[in-house]
Image (cartoon, rainbow, N blue to C red):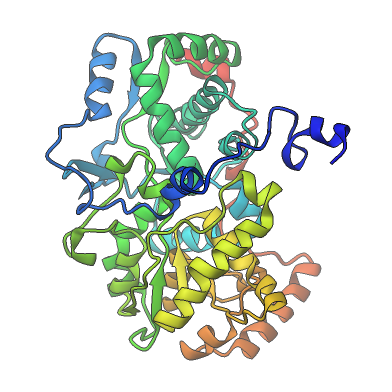
Amino acid sequence: MSDNSTQQGLAGHGAFFQDTNLSANEAEAATAWVRSHVDRRTMDLGERMDDIREHMWALEKEGEIIVHRITDDHKPIEVDTLYGWKKRVPTNQLWHHKSCGQCGNIPGYPTSLIWFMNHFGTDYLDETDQTSCTAWNYHGSGIGNVESLAAVFLRNFHQAYVSGKQHGYENGHFFPLVHCGTSFGNYKEIRKYLVESAELREKVKKILGKLGRLVDGKIVIPEEVVHYSEWLHVMRNRIASELQTIDMSNIRVTTHAACHYYKMVAEDAIYDNSILGGNRTAVGTSVAQALGAQVIDYSTWYDCCGFGFRHIISEREFTRSFTMNRKIKVAREEANADVMIGIDTGCITTMDKNQWIGKAHDMNYSIPIIADVQLAALACGADPFKIVQLQWHASPCEDLVEKMGISWDKAKADFQEYLKQVEQGNVEYLYNPELATNQNINMKAGASA
C-alpha cells in the first residue's frame, strides 16, 4: 500500500480510519452484539431501570419541555414492553414519518401500510414536510453528532405536533408513526439523551429557535416513539377478522427482528405472552400468527441481518457473506421457509438485494424477503404489483404468490395494462396529493400558537 493510500485510511474513509489490529478474541468481543440474545430470559428484569417517561413528566411539570401526549382521540391500545411497562400505541390521527430507504428501495412497504389505513378509515396525514432522521449518516460514516441528531429529531416531531393546524385542528392532533427501524432506534436513544441532559436541550433549543421549531419557547418531545410494526401488531386481529381473504395455513414463515427495534433501547420493545412464549419481541411474528401462517423458528433468529451501516458501504462483501451464511442459508435449510418477513428497511434491503451474490460461490439459496405489512396486504387481497409492489424486490416472489393462490402472470398483465392508463394520465392515488404538501403554514406563527 502506498503512503498516499495509507493516509486515506481504511476503504477511503479518511486517515482517522486505521486498522485496529485486534486479536481474534478481541474482534469476536467487538462484534458479539450481532448475535446477542436480547429477550426476557437473558435480561435481569428484577433490576430496576429508569423509565425515561417519568423524567419527561417531571420536566414538563417544571416548564422545561412540552410532551406531545397520546389522547383518547388517538384511540390507543395498551401493550407490554420488555420490563412489563405499559406502552400506548395510537391507532388513529397518525402522522407518517416515512423512511428514505423504503421510499427509494421498497415502495410497496409504505403503500401497503397506507392501503390498510384507508380500508380502516384511519385519520392520518402523509405530508411531505419531514426530513430523513440522518441516523444513516451517523452510523454509516461517523460524521454526525448527538446535537445534529437531536435537532433533526425535534424538528420532525415538532412538525408532527403542529401539522394539524393547517387543517383546522389543534396542536397535537396527529401523532407521529415512524416507518423505519433505524429512525425508531435512533429517536429512542436521542429522546433519552435529551431528557437526561440539560446541556443538550439548551444547545438544540438555540438551533430550533432559529428554525421556528419551538412552541412557547419549548422543545416538543413525544410521549412515545411508535414504530409502524407496533401499529400493525395491535391491529393484527382486526386485519385477520375484517380484511383477510386468503387462507395462509400452508405458508411457512420465518421472521427477522431488527436490531434497531429490540436490541437498541431494549426496554421499549413490545413483548406478548401469547407470542413466542413472551420471551422474544412480538412484532412481526404476531402478524404472521394472526394470519394463520405457520411460523417456523431457525437457529440464527437473533442474528443481525448483516447490514451494519458502515461496512455495507466499505466492506460490502462482509455484509453479503453474513446475510447469506447466517440468515438466508439457515432459513432455507432449517425452516424451508416460503418467505421471511422483516420489520425494518435496512434488514429487508440487505437480505432481499444480496441473494444473487451467493451464486458466485455456488450458494444457490433464495427466499422472498418482504415486510410483515406486505405479507399481510397480500393475504388481504392487495394487488401484488400496484400496492405491494413486489416487482421492486430482487428476491424471487413468484412462487410465494402462486402458493397463496394468486396468479402472478395475471397480476403482472393487469399491472402492465394499468401502466398504459398511467401514461395517458389516468393516475390512481392512495392519498390526496393536495393534502401531502404543506406550503401555506408559517412555522413562526405556528410556534406561537
Q: Nearer the viewer, residue 326 or 262?
A: 326
Is residue 337 visible to the viewer in this orientation of the structure? no
Q: How far across and down, in percent of the image, does residue 328 sit? A: 52, 72
Q: How far across and down, in percent of the image, does residue 155 sit? A: 53, 25
Is 320 placed left or right of 54 in the picture? right
Query: Which residue is depicted at the point 39% across and 55% down?
Result: 229
Q: Residue furthest left?
A: 46
Q: Nearer the viewer, residue 68 or 18?
A: 18
Query: Which residue is depicted at the point 54% across and 69% down?
Result: 325
Query: Which residue is depicted at the point 54% across and 61% down?
Result: 348
Q: Nearer the viewer, residue 77 or 43?
A: 43
* Quadrant of the snapshot with the C terminus: top left
Residue 190 appears in which quarter of the rendering? Answer: top left
Above or below, comparing residue 50 to residue 219 in the picture: below
Above or below, comparing residue 438 to residue 30 in the picture: above
Above or below, comparing residue 61 to residue 13 in the picture: above
Query: Which residue is depicted at the point 50% across and 41% down?
Result: 183
Total marks shown come to: 0
Is residue 225 visible to the viewer in this orientation of the structure? yes
Q: How far across and down, in percent of the image, does residue 260 sit? A: 44, 46
Above or below, comparing residue 448 to residue 437 in the picture: above
Q: How far across and down, in percent of the image, does residue 205 sit? A: 49, 11
Q: Nearer the viewer, residue 85 or 299?
A: 299
